[in-house]
Amino acid sequence: PEGVMKATAHWLELKGYTETKPSMVFDEEFSHQVFETGKIEEAKVLQKFFKRTNQPLTQPWLIQLVSGLVKRFPVFYLMKLGFATVFHPRTRNWDRSRDAIKEYVDERNAEIHKALKLDAKGAD
């Protein structure tokens, strides 16, 4: 039942009957991050998610999480996290994999749009 509900909600969003749900926005940001770099940068995904859903970045639970990490993590690990924030990591030789994934996703999206009778912009 849960899968059917999610598929129905996704169908309604694609047809333009409902607004895009935050879970879909998160899925899009997460997928984009993985497809582009081959890695997951949690901070970047959260930042873009909050921006697209018009939420403040300074969420109380997020501040508590980060302050807890800073207090408990070794300094070397924190330096490594900071370095990854400045110099965005990428998976080596990711270009061919990214292109193959992009081609597959584009094909699936075209099939979905054709099945739902959507034009390139969205709902008819």
Image (cartoon, rainbow, N blue to C red):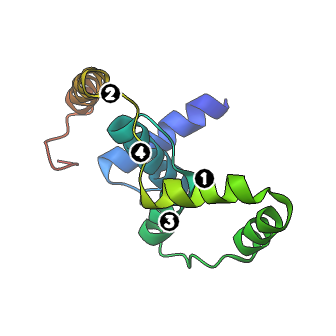
Question: CB of mark 4 within 8 Å of CB of mark 3?
Answer: no
| Location of residue 74 in the rendering, given as x and y in whole percent from the top left corner | 79, 56
- Which residue has dot 3 on it? 47
Residue drawn at the location 63% of the way across and 79% of the way down: 58
| Location of residue 35 in the rendering, given as x and y in whole percent from the top left corner | 36, 36
Q: Quadrant of the N terminus?
A: top right
* Residue in front for this viewpoint, 103 or 120: 103
Mark 1 vs mark 2: give the one in front. Answer: 1
| Location of residue 40 in the rendering, given as x and y in whole percent from the top left corner | 51, 42
Residue drawn at the location 70% of the way across and 54% of the way down: 76
Q: Is label 4 in a helix, a strand or a loop?
A: helix
Q: Would you say 87 lies left or right of 99 here?
A: right
* Residue in front for this viewpoint, 11 or 96: 96
19 to 113, vertically: above or below = below
Residue count near mark 4 (Cα–Cα under 10 Å), binned few <14, some 14–19, many ≥20: some
Q: Is label 1 in a helix, a strand or a loop?
A: helix
Query: In the rendered structure, which disc, 1 or 2, sits on the residue that comes first in sequence?
Result: 1
Inter-mark Cα distance, 4 to 3: 12 Å
The count of marks equals: 4
- Which residue has dot 2 on it? 94
Residue count near mark 3 (Cα–Cα under 10 Å), binned few <14, some 14–19, many ≥20: some
Residue sitting farthest toward the front = 76
Inter-mark Cα distance, 4 to 1: 20 Å
Inter-mark Cα distance, 4 to 2: 13 Å
